[in-house]
Amino acid sequence: MKNKIIIAMNILLFCMFTFVNPCYAEEINPQKLLEQVDENLWANTKFITGRLIIDNGRKVRTLTQDSWMQGVERSYSRYKSPAREKGTKMLKIAGKLWMYTPRTDRKILIAGHLLRQSMMGSDLSYEDMMEDHKLSHSYSATLEGFDELAGTRCAILHLVARDKKTTYQTRKVWITPEDRIVLKEERFAKSGKLLKTILFKAYEKIETRLFPRTMVFRDMLKENTQTTYKFDVIKFDVDIPAKYFSQSILKR
């Protein structure tokens, strides 16, 4: 009897501390976990005031902006500073992205190879601006293993795009199963080459949701650069004027 108890305890300890925890893994449904992440982050509408801090390895500059979002199809951003970017606007509607710059007083449709270019010198591309969608709808998830990140145990999910037109065909996300929040994400090219990493930091309860106050982006094809997005104001389920999602907003 004593030997059976010892064996049972050893099995339990193995399940608790092994790196890829089979006992824990049986309790995690990867696709369901991804859905729970989306439920936490997504709302019908959002309003955000934020700062985009761009470090290109030589100098650091900060852009401030207001953004309004409706679902996954519509978003409108207006840049407030610095002077060079003040008045610049971006509008996304149903898979199309337009940009207005006051210096030229004209709007352009950003498409084709332009989508892959750096957005205002940051580590984000214009294509990244189009990637604002629910992961659980766009990707199939499998559990790759477990890891510890910033002292927190995370499940690592491997995501494969359902649609071949999706910009990033594969991703990896580090999610805390208890809080159902993302701490890290990696985005890959079709070849498997790592293109982008994102760290999600300073989570805070805002209304009924846990939301990161800071996101740190790195373009892995560049050296010594990073872009930090700080969210100063976040509001969910706000009323947004219809004119904000019309091309008529793209003017002085």
Image (tube, helix red, strand yellow):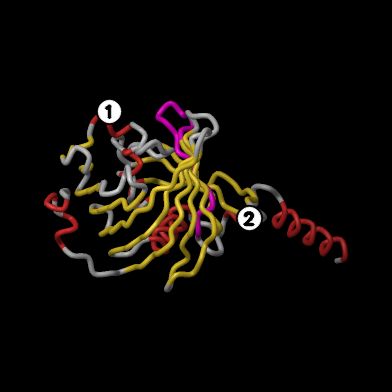
Q: Amino acid at mark 1?
A: His
Kind of residue indicated by mark 2: Arg
Report if residue 46 lies within the magenta region. Answer: no
Give above or below for 156 relative to 58: below
The residue segment tinted magenta is 181-195
**On screen, residue 104 above or below 249:** above
In this view, which residue lies farthest toward the top?
A: 191
In the rendered structure, the answer to whether residue 190 lies left or right of residue 46 reads: right
* Residue at x 64% of width, y 47% of height: 20
- Kindly identify which residue carries mark 1: 113
Real-space Cα distance between discs 2 and 1?
Answer: 39 Å
The number of numbered badges drawn on the structure is: 2
Q: Provide the secondary structure element on which disc 1 rests.
A: helix
Disc 1 crowd, CA 10 A, few/some/many (<14, 14-19, 20+): few
Query: Disc 2 marks which residue?
Result: 153
Q: Main secondary structure of the magenta part?
A: strand
Residue that extends furthest to the right in the rendered view of this protein: 2
